């Protein structure tokens, strides 16, 4: 909503304030002011001129040579506007003026002719195209004949105004009108606004009943419908004052009738529609729901297919307007129109909203209908429109208003108590203070012994509950005058849940491993959403995506990290290490969607050597070490295992392991398939993804202290030659199962294959540590246990002990 | 030459030899040569048996003195040489201490999560708990249960990503309100929770809009919770995040699920209220919205809105982080450029 400060002055005494100070009051009162604009404030050297002579310039197809009286002198000006003519009053930017866009006016010579200044258009003065009147679109702006030559031109084109732009919340649709804003300003400034009484001079002959009667199908859909007729209107341009007001509100002046309907809408917030009465071809207006598939051509000449959510104005047979949204081509005003029928109505906001949004026909009018209308001023609005049409267009107003009125009491009573007010706000207001606030708001009130009854005028239809009323009291009292306290409640322990603690701990562990946390997008392509899923399932696509890149919710975090890595790679980040925690999504049915918490990590790039020649390797075992670090922070009851996963989508078939706790798969770790890495412009890339929920839910043992061993233990090393296919996990399992009760630890300390080792074999070496917490282990005991392990390994894998 | 003379000569020559030796090896060789089992002194002492009985004590004493003297001198020389060697070693071991240390890569929490964690810790300290919520919610929970029925104009404020006619990606963490309020057992004390998480709006991504961002919802419900309590809480939080020297102001606003509603501004930390581009010349920066929970929301969650009152607030950590660190483009948070992420690995002046 754009509000002209000058217009506001017509209703209020603003002599003690400024646009800035008033804007501050508005903002702190709840109507947030976005900006204050001063149109053309900086433009100097702008005066009214009169074109004395005007001749086409030889050798030019469009330039004119003019002499222009600017009061103090007569200037030679070469002008290129097509609509220039002698005798016109025009706006002259004299030498020294600086127009928007830093366009400096200087003495110039055009095709040999001296030109000292410029006759300007509104466009050149910085008016946006969207509000420039039709008649001034192509060329210079021509002023009214009574403009005083030599005077500053600003006031003639409304450049002496401050435009306050509001960012209104949906509940304050009352401020979508000048009167509404004036009421608000009056409350804030503690004044009473002054509005002129609206008088309509009606024709003595005839009455509106002779012309039209109104009927509505459903009083709920159309609580109020009024119509006035004005005969013999001459449709020309509206007066300058009206054009300026419209332009300052961001509305383009069109012609007298359109401008009057817009002007009245701005003043009252009441949208109007004007029909060509003769074209209605009926003496009846009937408002009803459209039937399914009913066709109707709106005045933009588009044929619309309607449904029962759309309300139509009909002439008893066929639609003539789409209620609240757009008129019909069949009843449109044209230059030949003789009698104008002005409609002012209140429609069900929901229907207007559905119609405007389905047909994509949002307008100043429809948005006001959607948010509510002041029922008390429908008649005032239609009266003012009729009055202006008769006064400015020479028309004759037919006596009376045709109407269908289905509303009862207009005012609402809201009750509360002083105690409730103070209890909700946290203040200690007295009855008297509350009365004074309600008076300022212009709300009728009866306050006695702490009981408050407020009568809310229809212009504030947003106030229905006591909480609404209390907010009004609070905002006029001043939010910033309310004391600040903290809740006094029974004290409650604030603590993280085990899952939240786990999440934080894993974060720290990952960061300790050098990974930076990423937050990627949950929405992605179907391909990426499914690719690295730990478990594949049905995807969750959007019904209304915005771009092909973001159409479905992801089932994995790795693909987001791969995108991130590609971005980093492209921006010369050489060592990439990222992790992410977030939700993944599975669609179970149209009513059941499952979300799980996951953690994922990625490392890739070129490790850089430090000056000592050392480098941190980037390989499978690095990323696996990260996974082991996380998992080793929890004492899962069941055994964790890693199993080669040869078929995981997007992953290297020989370098990927599924991670299990017991029989439950909790995630995977491995190298990205070389093809995937290449497609993403990445070097060898290593990733993992784990289900935090599964880790959380897996049973864990409690931590118990074990006494430190006082007796010395003993180590034995074993080196084996074994088939390459035998895994470390298998060997370790046999060792641990056959190690005897004193085996405390098994440690792999060497792995070798290649030269001096037979093809298909590898050499591995383990160190086994034995200890007995209750006694010193005897040499023979250790030897015996160690022999058992050797034997078991030979039996299980046909190893050769070296 | 008698034995005494021999002893004195040996003593004299040995002392010189010890003094003149330059290495530990030489000293050790001398010790063996002089005092060892087959050493020169030992050899001389073997001659004692040929001496006159009366001479033996005198010579014996002299011999002992010489042996003690030589032993001490050898030990002293050894220590001296060892000290020299150590000094030499220390000189040789001197390194360039200005060379960089051996560092290990460290990661860090995403800046948005840092802001969220800071808030979480603040509220945990005030006795709040933290609750989560799903990102896919029903239309009913996201809108109707927070007092935004079908066709309500407030639905214009947020265009949503729908999955089907009844489910969507939550547009606000307020979607957790109904469930949390409904599930709370008020016989066990007040409800005090915050709920951080991702939310989604159908916006085109640009410098100030992101289709995915974060919110932290705060909810307190008990008997006698006032707007003054809300303002006190919001002021505390604002100063915690933006610094105690910030001024805080409150403006009436509108949210369908709160009444009265409030918006909170902090004085611009760039210009300190004088007016600049960051605060659009107003001197204030809007940071969050809040209000007293609408009675309809309480009633729909089966909480008696006459007996109980409460407040709710919603904070945008993305915006907080942008303001706090002067980040000019929200998309940086989701591109995960490590050059960006790593800038927040240090604690600054707070």
Image: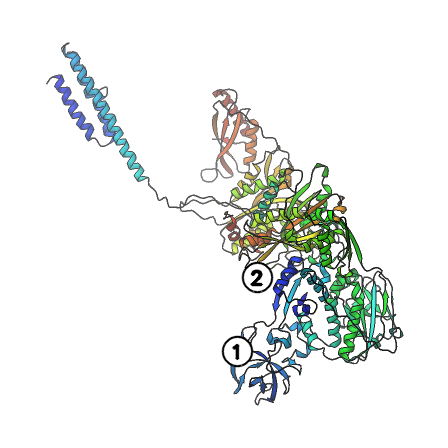
The residue lying toward the viewer, choosing from A166 and A742, is A166
Front-most of A760 and A733? Answer: A733
Give the structural element (helix, strand or loop) at label 1.
loop
The total number of labels drawn is 2
Crowding at label 1, few (<14), some or many (≥20) Cα neighbours within 10 Å? some
* Contact flag, marks 1 and 2 (Cβ < 8 Å): no
> Quadrant location of the N terminus of chain A?
bottom right
**Mark linked to residue B281:** 2
Give residue A583's mark. none
Left or right of B58 on screen, residue B244: right
> Residue A622: x and y, percent?
51, 43
**View extreme (top): residue:** B53
Q: Which is nearer the eye, A24 or B222?
A: A24
Q: Position of residue B62 (x, y in %)?
A: 17, 17
Q: Is residue B94 above or below residue B58?
A: below
Q: Chain of mark 2?
A: B
- Viewer can see residue A193: yes
Direction from residue B297 to residue B26 in the image, left or right: left
Query: Image quadrant of residue A373?
Result: bottom right
Between the C-alphas of marks 1 and 2, the distance is 29 Å
Image-quadrant location for residue A158: bottom right
Report the side of B44 relative to A192 (left or right). left
Pointer 1 residue: A96
Residues A590 and A421: in front is: A421
Residue A150: quarter of image? bottom right
Mark 2, Cα crowd under 10 Å, few <14 / some 14-19 / many 20+, is some
Which element carries disc 2, helix, strand or loop?
loop
Give the letter of the chain under mark 1.
A
Residue A80 vertical position relative to residue B188 in the rendered view, above or below: below
Residue A546: x, y in percent? 66, 59
């Amino acid at each position: 909503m754009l509000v002209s400060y000058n217009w506001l002055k017509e209703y209020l005494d603003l002599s003690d304030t400024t646009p800035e100070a008033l804007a501050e009051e508005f903002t702190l009162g709840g109507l947030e002011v976005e900006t204050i604009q001063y149109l053309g404030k900086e433009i100097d050297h702008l005066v009214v001129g009169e074109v004395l002579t005007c001749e086409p310039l030889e050798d030019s197809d469009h330039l004119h040579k003019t002499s222009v009286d600017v009061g103090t002198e007569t200037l030679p000006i070469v002008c290129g506007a097509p609509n220039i003519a002698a005798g016109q009053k025009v706006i002259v930017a004299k030498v020294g003026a600086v127009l928007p866009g830093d366009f400096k006016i200087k003495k110039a010579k055009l095709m040999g002719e001296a030109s000292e200044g410029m006759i300007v258009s509104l466009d050149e003065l910085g008016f946006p195209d969207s509000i420039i009147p039709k008649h001034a679109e192509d060329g210079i702006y021509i002023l009214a004949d009574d403009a005083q030559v030599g005077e500053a031109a600003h006031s003639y084109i409304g450049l002496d105004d401050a435009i306050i732009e509001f960012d209104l919340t949906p509940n304050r649709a009352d401020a979508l009108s000048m009167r509404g804003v004036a009421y608000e300003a009056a409350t804030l400034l503690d004044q009473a606004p002054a509005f002129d009484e609206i008088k309509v001079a009606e024709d003595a002959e005839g009455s509106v009943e002779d012309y039209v009667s109104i009927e509505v199908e459903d009083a709920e859909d159309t609580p109020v419908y009024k119509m006035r007729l004005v005969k013999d209107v001459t449709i020309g341009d509206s007066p300058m004052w009206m054009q300026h007001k419209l332009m300052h509100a961001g509305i383009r002046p069109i012609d007298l009738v359109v401008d009057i309907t817009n002007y009245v809408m701005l003043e009252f917030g009441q949208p109007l529609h004007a029909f060509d009465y003769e074209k209605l071809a009926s003496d009846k207006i009937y408002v009803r729901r459209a039937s399914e598939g009913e066709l109707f051509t709106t005045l933009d000449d588009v044929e619309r297919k309607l449904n029962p959510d759309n309300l139509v104005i009909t002439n008893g047979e066929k639609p003539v307007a789409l209620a609240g949204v757009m008129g019909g081509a069949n009843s449109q005003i044209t230059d030949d129109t003789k009698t104008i029928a002005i409609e002012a109505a209140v429609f069900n906001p929901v229907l207007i909203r559905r119609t405007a949004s389905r047909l994509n026909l949002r307008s100043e009018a429809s948005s006001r209908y959607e948010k509510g209308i002041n029922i008390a001023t429908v008649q005032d609005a239609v009266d003012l429109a009729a009055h202006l049409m008769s006064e400015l267009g020479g028309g004759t107003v037919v006596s009376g208003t045709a109407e269908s009125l289905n509303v009862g009491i207009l005012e609402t009573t809201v009750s509360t108590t002083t105690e409730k007010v103070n209890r909700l706000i946290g203040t200690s207001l007295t009855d008297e203070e509350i009365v004074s606030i309600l008076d300022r708001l212009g709300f009728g009130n009866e306050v006695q012994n702490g009981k408050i009854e407020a009568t809310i005028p229809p212009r504030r239809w947003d106030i229905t509950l006591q909480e609404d009323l209390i907010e009004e009291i609070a905002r006029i009292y001043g939010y910033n005058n309310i004391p600040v306290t903290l809740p006094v409640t029974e004290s409650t322990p604030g603590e993280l849940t085990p899952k939240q603690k786990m999440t934080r701990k894993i974060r720290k562990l990952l960061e300790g491993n050098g990974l930076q946390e990423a937050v990627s997008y949950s929405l992605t392509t179907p391909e990426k959403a499914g690719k690295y899923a730990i478990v594949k399932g049905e995807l969750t696509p959007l019904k209304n995506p915005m771009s092909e890149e973001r159409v479905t919710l992801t089932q994995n975090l790795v693909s987001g990290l791969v995108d991130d890595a590609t971005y980093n790679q492209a921006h010369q980040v050489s060592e990439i290490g990222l992790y992410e925690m977030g939700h993944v999504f599975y669609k179970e049915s149209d009513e059941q969607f499952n979300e799980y918490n996951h953690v994922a990590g990625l490392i890739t790039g070129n490790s850089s050597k430090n000056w000592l020649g050392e480098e941190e390797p980037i390989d499978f075992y690095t990323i696996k070490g990260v996974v082991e670090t996380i998992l080793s922070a929890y004492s899962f009851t069941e055994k964790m295992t890693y199993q080669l996963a040869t078929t995981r989508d997007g992953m290297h078939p020989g370098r990927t392991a599924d991670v299990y706790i017991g029989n439950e798969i909790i995630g995977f770790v491995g190298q990205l398939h070389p093809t995937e890495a290449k497609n993403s412009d990445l070097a060898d890339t290593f990733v993992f993804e784990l289900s935090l929920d599964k880790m959380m839910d897996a049973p864990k043992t409690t931590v118990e202290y074990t006494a430190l061993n006082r007796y010395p233990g003993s180590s034995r090393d074993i080196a084996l030659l074994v088939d390459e296919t035998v895994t470390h996990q298998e060997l370790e399992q046999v060792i641990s199962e056959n190690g005897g009760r004193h085996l405390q630890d098994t440690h792999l300390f060497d792995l070798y294959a290649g030269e001096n080792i037979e093809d298909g074999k590898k050499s591995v070496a383990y160190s086994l540590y034995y200890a007995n917490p209750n006694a010193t282990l005897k040499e023979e005991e250790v030897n015996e246990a160690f022999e058992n392990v050797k034997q078991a390994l030979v039996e299980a894998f046909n190893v050769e002990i070296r | 030459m008698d034995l005494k003379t021999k002893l004195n000569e040996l003593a004299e020559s040995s002392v010189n030899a010890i003094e003149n030796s330059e290495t530990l090896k030489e000293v050790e060789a001398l010790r063996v040569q002089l005092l060892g089992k087959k050493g020169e002194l030992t050899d001389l002492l073997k001659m004692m048996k040929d001496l006159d009985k009366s001479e033996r004590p005198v010579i014996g004493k002299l011999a002992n003195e010489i042996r003690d003297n030589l032993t001490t001198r050898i030990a002293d020389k050894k220590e001296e040489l060892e000290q020299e060697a150590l000094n030499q070693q220390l000189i040789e071991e001197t390194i360039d201490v200005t060379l960089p240390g051996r560092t290990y890569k460290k990661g860090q929490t995403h800046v948005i999560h840092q802001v969220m964690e800071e808030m979480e810790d603040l509220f945990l300290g005030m006795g709040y708990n933290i609750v989560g919520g799903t990102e896919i919610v029903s239309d009913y929970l996201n809108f109707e249960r927070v007092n935004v029925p079908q066709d309500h104009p407030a639905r214009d404020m947020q265009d949503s990503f729908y999955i089907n006619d009844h489910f969507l990606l939550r547009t606000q963490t307020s979607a957790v309100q109904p469930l949390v309020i409904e599930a709370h057992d008020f016989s066990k004390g007040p409800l005090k929770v915050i709920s951080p998480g991702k939310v989604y709006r159908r916006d085109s991504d640009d410098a100030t809009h992101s289709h995915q961002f974060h919110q932290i919802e705060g909810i307190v419900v008990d008997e006698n919770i006032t707007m003054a309590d809300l303002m006190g809480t919001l002021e505390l939080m604002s100063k915690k995040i933006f610094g105690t020297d910030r001024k805080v102001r409150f403006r009436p606003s509108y949210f369908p699920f709160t009444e009265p509603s409030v918006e909170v501004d902090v004085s611009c930390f760039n210009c300190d209220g004088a007016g600049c581009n960051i605060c659009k010349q107003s001197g204030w920066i809007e940071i969050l919205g809040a209000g007293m929970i609408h009675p309809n929301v309480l009633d729909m969650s089966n909480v008696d809105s006459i007996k109980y009152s409460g407040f709710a607030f919603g904070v945008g950590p993305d915006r907080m982080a942008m303001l706090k660190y002067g980040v000019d483009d929200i998309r940086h948070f989701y591109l995960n450029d490590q050059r960006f992420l790593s800038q927040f690995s240090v604690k600054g002046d707070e």
